């Protein structure tokens, strides 16, 4: 006997929202229906595990999907728990009530494991009306001998329930979807296949689409680590990323508190932004009980771990009515915090137990990892994992940790010194390094632009401060004796010393307001001159700030000169003979612009090159005259 039920006014309004606006992507309907079918199969398996008698126990657990293009029908069958007449009315007659929720509550009251119950049937089911103008649900309960019934509705104002006399399933549910004219794309097998692979690849029951098994990859994150082979991890990684290469490393994480979740993440062998593309595309795939909720969820990992590829699957995450928007970001934040700590702990163990493997990681993903300087909660762990080349190494491939630097530090030393440079060669030629080399103080070489932000934000590690070598005042290093005797020039006589003071004044006159001062340097050993900051800022940071502020001016600094350098001694001789000799000005300006060039401030090298050629011409002419060539 047929029965017709009217939806209540508020239910009609809610149904209108669901079918027209709440689900922004129409393909979600298949995810919801497959999730509900998996839910029903899980309930049946749970009943059997408890020893309950079920109808047709010989039926295999599974989901079958078929397409009738001519009739414009999609059929989804499952051999799950099914529904009675009253359950049909209850579950499909009222929005926001869920048989799954009730089932979970009953299990919780009995302190039993709810297993893999997916979905909130009362809401997710109605997403089908985004693509259907009529839906029939024929179902037979696995319990008792009640006959099958069919629920019929167009999703507008009412639904009808009629006894099913023919074609009833032995057990489970059959959903017949009459597809709308504007949704005929879903009558194509490849379209449904792509949706299933995207959202339902890891459903624990076989899904057949037109007789072909769709979900062939197991949800490895749910399996014990000890039962998974390296080959299985590799196969899963390739399935997830389409990368045929072996992953660099694998992290399999299972957590019960503060939030329950499983995570399977991989560190690829290639940097994510190797070509500079898709740097903003990252994140882990978020699953709820094996069902994909969001691809590349950025909130699950911080940006500095964006090299990770993988999945997070949680039992605890509450979803809103559409499954598309998360209700409580607090749970996501807890997952992120836990994943971050687990990854950092893993990297710490890797660095300790296999330095070569960690070095490979750093060389591949170090550029991205560096941006973790703003992770204050994990600052110490992050700092321990940083790696730099330094003056301690013999070549550009050497790497050191901050802890290793501190172990080699001198007893009186309370700073970690660093120099920013585009390469090791440039760092070694930096005049600011000379005093540290002379005193045997190690200096870290920072080659990446972000490195200085790292040091600036970290500021301190343990009792050591991070200090830019460029900003160090020479007198603060007086406590450290010179490690080897310098090859000093002959001491100037008292008269020559006074004449040199006159040369310094002449240099100030020549350079004018291009510098704040010219003075004899205490830091230089091999270079003739260097520009020293007066405000404590490094030249690289100053350049960056000027770019950001669109300031193209050149900062005024102190020009420090090495009184013992041959160029300055030669200038002294020329100055003694003729204080107005043009070569003095040419040489002084050349020293200044050469220093600008080393600091990265010289914009136009043409004048510098022309001056070099002039000086070379004069020098070569003097040489030929002396040698009488």
Image: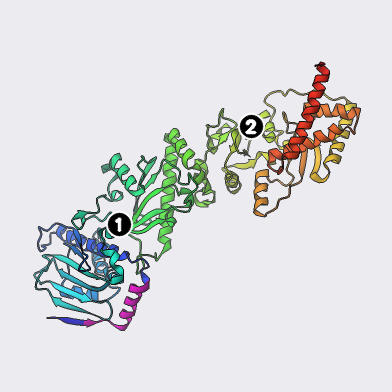
535 shown above or below 485: below
Q: Which residues are magenta?
A: 5-21
Taking the spot 29% from the left edge, 40% from the top edge, the residue there is 231
Taking the spot 74% from the left edge, 47% from the top edge, the residue there is 555
323 shown above or below 423: below
From the viewer's perspective, is 74 left or right of 553?
left
Residue with the mark numbered 2: 428
Under circle 1, the secondary element is helix
* Image coordinates for residue 162, horizontal then vertical, percent: 14, 77
Question: In which image quadrant can residue 204 be found?
Answer: bottom left
Residue with the mark numbered 1: 194
387 shown above or below 548: above
Image quarter of the N terminus? bottom left
Of mark 1 and mark 2, the one earlier in the sequence is 1
Q: Is residue 123 visible?
A: no
Taking the spot 20% from the left edge, 69% from the top edge, the residue there is 71
Tell me, yes or no, whether the highlighted magenta stretch contains residue 357: no
* Image coordinates for residue 194, horizontal then vertical, percent: 30, 57
Tell me, yes or no, whether the highlighted magenta stretch contains residue 15: yes
From the viewer's perspective, is 1 left or right of 566?
left
Dominant SS type (magenta): helix
């Amino acid at each position: 006997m047929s029965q017709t039920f009217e939806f209540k006014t508020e239910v009609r309004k809610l149904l209108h929202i669901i079918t027209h606006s709440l689900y922004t992507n129409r393909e979600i309907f298949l995810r919801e229906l497959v999730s509900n079918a998996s839910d029903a199969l899980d309930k049946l398996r749970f009943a059997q595990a408890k020893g309950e008698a079920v109808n047709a126990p010989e039926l295999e657990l599974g989901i079958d999907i078929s397409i009738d293009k001519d009739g414009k029908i999609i059929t989804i069958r499952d051999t799950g728990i099914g529904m009675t007449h009253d359950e049909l009315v209850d579950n499909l007659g009222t929005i926001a009530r869920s048989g799954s929720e009730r089932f979970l509550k009953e299990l919780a009251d009995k302190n039993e494991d709810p297993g893999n119950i997916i979905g909130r049937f009362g809401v997710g089911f109605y997403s089908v009306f985004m693509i259907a103008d009529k839906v029939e649900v024929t179902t037979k309960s696995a319990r008792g001998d009640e006959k099958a019934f069919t629920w019929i509705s167009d999703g507008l104002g009412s639904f009808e329930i009629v006894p099913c006399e023919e074609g009833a399933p032995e057990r489970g549910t059959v959903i017949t979807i009459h597809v709308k004219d504007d949704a005929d794309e879903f009558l194509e097998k490849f379209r449904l296949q792509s949706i299933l692979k995207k959202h339902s690849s890891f459903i624990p029951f076989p899904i057949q689409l037109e007789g072909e098994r769709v979900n062939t990859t197991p949800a490895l994150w749910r399996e014990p680590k000890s039962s998974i082979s390296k080959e299985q991890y590799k196969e899963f990684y390739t399935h997830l990323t389409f990368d045929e290469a072996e992953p660099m490393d694998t992290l399999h994480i299972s957590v019960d508190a503060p939030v329950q979740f499983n995570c399977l993440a991989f560190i690829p062998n290639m940097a994510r932004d190797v070509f500079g593309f898709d740097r903003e595309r990252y994140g882990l795939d978020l699953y709820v009980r094996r069902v994909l909720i969001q691809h590349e969820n950025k909130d699950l990992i911080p940006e500095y771990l964006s090299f990770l590829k993988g999945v997070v699957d949680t039992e605890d995450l509450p979803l809103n009515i559409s499954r598309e928007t998360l209700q409580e970001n607090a749970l996501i934040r807890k997952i992120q915090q836990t994943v971050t700590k687990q990854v950092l702990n893993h990297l710490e163990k890797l660095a300790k137990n296999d330095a070569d493997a960690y070095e490979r990681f750093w060389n591949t993903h170090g550029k991205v990892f560096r941006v973790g300087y703003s992770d204050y909660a994990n600052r110490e762990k992050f700092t321990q994992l940083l790696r730099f080349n330094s003056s301690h190494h013999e070549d550009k491939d050497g790497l050191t940790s901050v802890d290793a630097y501190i172990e080699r530090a001198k007893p009186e030393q309370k700073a970690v010194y660093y120099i920013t440079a585009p390469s090791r060669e440039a760092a070694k030629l930096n005049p600011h390094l000379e005093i540290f080399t002379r005193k045997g103080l190690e200096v870290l070489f920072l080659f990446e632009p972000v490195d200085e932000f790292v040091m600036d934000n970290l500021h301190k590690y343990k009792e050591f401060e991070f200090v830019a070598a460029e900003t160090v005042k020479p007198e603060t290093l007086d406590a450290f004796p010179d490690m080897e005797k310098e090859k000093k020039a002959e001491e100037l006589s008292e008269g020559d010393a006074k004449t040199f003071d006159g040369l310094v004044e002449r240099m100030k006159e020549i350079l004018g307001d291009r510098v704040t001062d010219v003075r004899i340097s205490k830091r230089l050993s091999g270079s003739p001159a260097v520009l020293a900051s007066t405000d404590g800022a490094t030249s690289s940071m100053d350049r960056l700030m000027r770019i950001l502020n669109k300031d193209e001016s050149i900062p005024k600094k102190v020009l420090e000169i090495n009184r013992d350098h041959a160029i300055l001694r030669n200038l002294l001789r020329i100055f003694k003979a003729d204080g107005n000799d043009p070569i003095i000005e040419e040489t002084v300006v050349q020293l200044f612009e050469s220093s600008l060039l080393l600091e990265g401030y010289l914009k136009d090298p043409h004048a510098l090159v022309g001056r070099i050629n002039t000086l070379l011409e004069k020098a070569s002419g003097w040489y030929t005259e002396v040698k009488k060539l």
